[in-house]
Amino acid sequence: MSQLRYAVVGTGHRAQMYVDAITDTYADRAALVALCEPNPVRADVYAQRVAGKGLPTPSVWTPDRLEDMIRDERIERVVICSRDDTHAEMIVRSLEAGVDVVVEKPLTIDAPSAARIEEAVARTGRQVVITFNYRYSPRNSALREVVRSGRIGRVTSIDFSWMLDTKHGADYFRRWHREKAHSGGLLVHKSSHHFDLVNWWIASEPRRVFASGGLRFYGAENAAARGLGERPERGTHEGAHDPFELDLREDPRLKTLYLEAEQHDGYVRDRDVFSDGITIEDNLALIVDYASGATLGYSLNAHAPWEGYRVAINGTEGRAELEVVERGSLVPDEGLHPVLDPSAVDAETSVLRPSGERLIVQRHWEEPVEIEIRRSGEGGHGGGDALLLSDVFVGPGDDPLGRPADWSDGIRSIAVGIAGNRSLETGLPVRVSDLGIALLAEDQP
């Protein structure tokens, strides 16, 4: 079998999933021949990771030479894992250079750059795959099956609450995500996953968004109001630490990727979550109207004492309820390790709030029924990550659930967050058709 020639753009923490997939599981059909990364330390981490497997060491290029890399290394497909605000430029330049793209969510962070991607896809005819791994999680697929089957009738409304705990949620406020200019805020960076799930679960498109929220827990002003006093500027320091601090020296991987790379770009990965300069929200609530007539009520809290989500989908014939506890509690002396994101593993349990998941369907005039959630195997997101990577590197087969996603799904997901950000600025509801993206015009099906 011939190998497709890949390049990975952006070699931060997230890139490992793709690098390992290309060089291990799918090495018979994929070859990682190049890395595109401005920081030489981070690039070298992955170059040596590949070489350590006995494979040819990929060449390293800087983003300003993306087109040269694609031409000289005969790249056929680019995987983009760089900072969110760079996605659009890297996507458009890759398409124009004649290659297909795989991109981490979110597709991009604002409406003008989304329109540029849309135009580039139409002009070049190339493919853009976006990796929505939450679709592949067995519990989310099971809810999609329930709705698709018609068991609860036509969907009328959705209640969706997502809790990020003070281990995982706090981490967005110490890294580049804390600046909306780089991430689009949690409504785009994090919630695009959630909005994609809703779009996919109910097979409809968002039409109007009203948002409310603010920075109410993290940040210097909130810390001062609660009397927290002076704090170190970063978590990597001598002396005692509190549970909100991340000491990069305690994690060999983070130490190598970020602490030892600071000298080249000045990026500080462990900023204090109660410092100045945070421009994103930590409490958010949205009302979203859909083309189908359904209404979504959504909330996100980034400083909860436990992590997980609750979603209820109401229909004309009943209701489906999915409750997920990814991490039931945190204790102060546990610190931030071994894992920040509990959805990526089977997290620890709590006595009163044990980690787990339950899907219940109750039709009108009937007793509730629990729906079995069948795990897809081992690995992140209940085996869902492995299914996603298979679709990315082997190609999607006939999937009745329609889990593979492309640029259009990416636009529909970020449309809610982009409109939500505009609503936060104006205090008014925002129609997604006013964002200037052709795909979101009202006359679209």
Image (tube, helix red, strand yellow):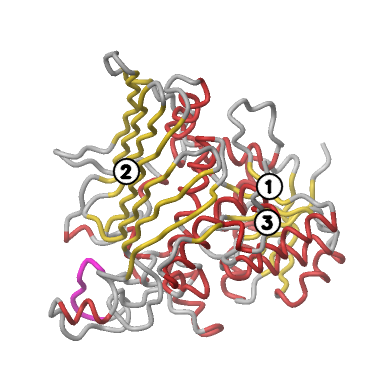
Mark 1 packing: few (<14 Cα in 10 Å), some, or many (20+)? few
Magenta span: helix, strand or loop, mainly? loop
Which amino acid does the dot numbered 2 rest on? Glu
Q: Mark 1 — residue?
A: 443
| Foreground residue among 122 and 52 | 122
* Circles 1 and 3: CB atoms closer than 8 Å: no
Q: Any magenta on residue 206?
A: no
Which amino acid does the dot numbered 1 rest on? Asp
* Circles 3 and 2: CB atoms closer than 8 Å: no
| Foreground residue among 110 and 342 | 110
Residue 99 spot, x, y in % from top left: 81, 56
Residue 427 spot, x, y in % from top left: 40, 68
Q: Mark 2 — residue?
A: 326
Q: Give the numbered dot on residue 79.
A: 3
Q: Closer to the N terminus: mark 1 or mark 3?
A: 3
Residue at horizontal 59 percent and vertical 50 percent from the top = 412
Q: Closer to the N terminus: mark 3 or mark 2?
A: 3
Q: CA distance from mark 1 to mark 3?
A: 33 Å
Residue at horizontal 61 percent and vertical 33 percent from the top = 402
Q: CA distance from mark 3 to mark 2?
A: 28 Å
Q: Any magenta on residue 241?
A: yes
Which amino acid does the dot numbered 3 rest on? Val
Assign the N terminus to one quadrant of the image.
top right
| Displayed quadrant of residue 223 | bottom left
Horizontal placement of 267 versus 57: left or right?
left
Residue at horizontal 41 percent and vertical 28 percent from the top = 315
